[in-house]
Amino acid sequence: MIRVMVVDDQALVRRGFALVLDNEPDIEVVAEAGTGIEAINAAREHQPDIILMDIRMPEMDGLEATAQILTTNGATSRVIILTTFDPDEYVFRALQAGASGFVLKDIPPESLVEAVRTVGDGGAMLAPGITKRLISEFAQKLGTGRNLAERLERLTSREREVLTAIAAGKSNAEIAEALFIGPATVKTHVSSLLSKLGLRDRAQAVVFAYECGLANVGERDVGF
Amino acid sequence: MIRVMVVDDQALVRRGFALVLDNEPDIEVVAEAGTGIEAINAAREHQPDIILMDIRMPEMDGLEATAQILTTNGATSRVIILTTFDPDEYVFRALQAGASGFVLKDIPPESLVEAVRTVGDGGAMLAPGITKRLISEFAQKLGTGRNLAERLERLTSREREVLTAIAAGKSNAEIAEALFIGPATVKTHVSSLLSKLGLRDRAQAVVFAYECGLANVGERDVGF
DNA sequence: TTTGATCTCCCCCAAAAGGTGGAGATGGCG
DNA sequence: CGCCATCTCCACCTTTTGGGGGAGATCAAA
């Protein structure tokens, strides 16, 4: 039995979703809320498996409430964002807040039910258009590495190691220490790889490393 | 009418999918192929709207064939990758190749039909587990910017401009030219922002810019 | 008005980086 | 075996970078 909470400031909409879901044998609506604040309290009290969350709400919007619930709480709930349309501006914030789904309110009822079951099973469900945008964003980030990665292959393995270290923000001296070689050797490698890649200085080398996928956002603590 | 091509090296599987799809009134299977090579030729000949593509195939695998079809061809077709299971290693290559969908063969027939219609309508369809991973990858990339972006706010707007220029691989002289200020002023800003962010040199500044989202992979031509 | 922040620019100086050229050692390959 | 790539290091040099001051102008806020 999937225990669901419905959050929407419009009581009518709320009831509509609740009725549709309660009609399913394996789904039970255990709570409703009309504001973000209410949602947070109700989530703590009822610990639902799934929270259907509207974005536009008085007092506290659905994204903020989602973030609160998923961080402060024991985080047993999973959130599906339900919005009227045109999610452009919200979708990234929603994913960042930890939402497991993002669907439009105009979907057919059976799709909503399917979304609840999918997310209940540990999956995720996005509106098709959103999936598409996510894919294209992702493909873009991956895709740029193509031709650049070819340039990368011109480097020797040692030079690639040095480049990786440069992309970690290391100075020549630090690289020397890390690779157990002399500072002079590091300079040789640096000069060589800059020349091979057609770069001017280590700052450009860092850019190159990120653009070609040698270094990736999120892999590094910027603790310096 | 959605015109579909089915590509799979196992004739039985191929026929199965084809029958399921042909059973739908708005879907027509116009071609089948058993290898990547065949797929490329058949795609050129029949110009299907949707291509259901298996990955594991003799001669040329589905990902390579997908990339070929979507780049060389007039690119009117959209590809849904169909694989047996455990897509871990393939999903990123598939998205990179330009696939619009990635579903597992064990889905119920109606889901396959739904995927075809969704992609036919210009959307995208991923298996729930894949959507989830994509989201978490994405949220991670967005999320890391959080605390770092706070450090960013300590900078003045001018310093942020300079940081952005540094992250573009520009030297101090180039930044001066770009911002219509003297090189000495650039040095002042650079020193100031490095100090405020706790960084040592511009290479670390580039790393910081990428990690906090001030610079993003794919935004830049690495033409230097 | 005074204060603080910001932007602009200057000086000097030390450290780091990058280029050039050379050189010895290793190991693979024809 | 000689050839070539690679890794290692050196010396010498120029350019860039970054730090430490100081200073004038502007502008908004106290």
Image (cartoon, coloured by chain):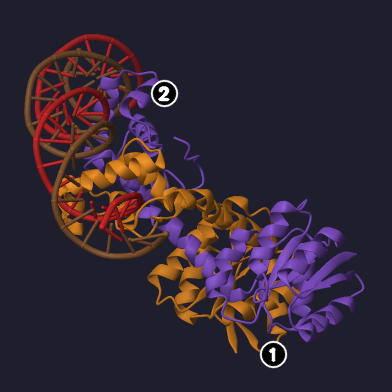
Chain colours: A orange, B purple, C brown, D red
Among the 4 quarters of the image, the one containing residue A17: bottom right
- Is residue A51 rendered to the left or right of residue B107? left
- Is residue A107 rendered to the left or right of residue B212? right
- Is residue A215 rendered to the left or right of residue B39? left
Mark 1 or 2, which is nearer the eye?
Answer: 2
Looking at the image, is B75 positioned above or below residue D11?
below
Amino acid identity at mark 1: Pro
Residue A25 is tagged as 1
Residue B219 visible somewhere in the drawing: yes
Nearest the camera: B80 or D7?
A: D7
Q: Residue B180 location in percent, x, y?
A: 39, 18
Among the 4 quarters of the image, the one containing residue B131: bottom right
Q: Could you tell me which chain the residue with mark 1 belongs to?
A: A
Looking at the image, is B68 positioned above or below residue B196?
below
Q: Residue A154 location in percent, x, y?
A: 42, 50
Nearest the camera: A32 or A127?
A: A127
Instruction: For mark 2, give the secondary structure.
Output: helix
Is label 1 in contact with label 2 (beta carbons under 8 Å)?
no
Amino acid identity at mark 2: Ala
Q: Which residue is found at the position 25% from the left and 54% from the top?
A: A223
Residue B222 is tagged as none
Q: Residue D6 location in percent, x, y?
A: 30, 54
Q: Which residue is found at the position 86% from the left and 65% from the top?
A: B2
Q: Quadrant of the C terminus of chain B?
A: top left
Q: Which residue is found at the position 27% from the left and 49% from the top?
A: A169
Residue that extends furthest to the right in the rendered view of this protein: B25
Q: Residues within 10 Å of mark 1 (few under 14, many from 20)?
A: few
Q: Residues within 10 Å of mark 2 (few under 14, many from 20)?
A: few
Residue B178 is tagged as 2
* Alpha carbons under labels 1 and 2: distance apart: 65 Å
